Image (cartoon, rainbow, N blue to C red):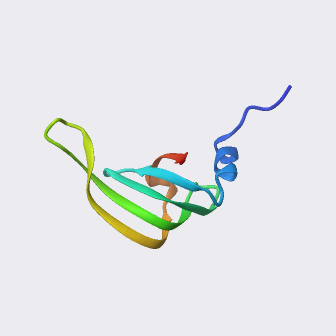
Amino acid sequence: MSEKPMPQDYIRLSMEKRVKVKVQEGQELEGVLHAYDEHYNIILGDVLESIMGLDKNGKFIPVRQNQIDMLFVRGDRIVSIATI
């Protein structure tokens, strides 16, 4: 019987790929995943940071964007990670 995949398996398979990371406080990050550790702290490169806000219809939209060369993100701030 094969073992069920674990979250760290997904992270490992996402290495050196472009990912979208949602973090607390209404922030989204898109960048290349370069490293992670056992606490799910991650290092992203070529990052587009989007600060999200609500429009008049209640939809989340980017209200400010920044380009960042390299970024460390603490694992306890991460809500989700997806390859794009």
Residue nearest the observer in this picture, 44 or 75: 44
In the picture as drawn, the residue positioned furthest to the left comes out as 56
Residue 52 drawn at (x, y percent): 28, 51
Give me the residue at 64% from left, 50% from top: 11
Give me the residue at 53% from left, 64% from top: 44
Query: Quarter holding the N terminus?
Result: top right
In the picture as drawn, the residue positioned furthest to the right comes out as 1
In the picture as drawn, the residue positioned furthest to the bottom comes out as 69
Residue 31 drawn at (x, y percent): 50, 61
Give me the residue at 79% from left, 32% from top: 3
User: In this picture, is 5 found above or below 44?
Assistant: above
In the picture as drawn, the residue positioned furthest to the top comes out as 1
Residue nearest the observer in this picture, 3 or 13: 13
Residue 77 drawn at (x, y percent): 43, 53
Q: How many marks?
A: 0
Q: In this view, does 44 lie to the left or right of 50?
A: right
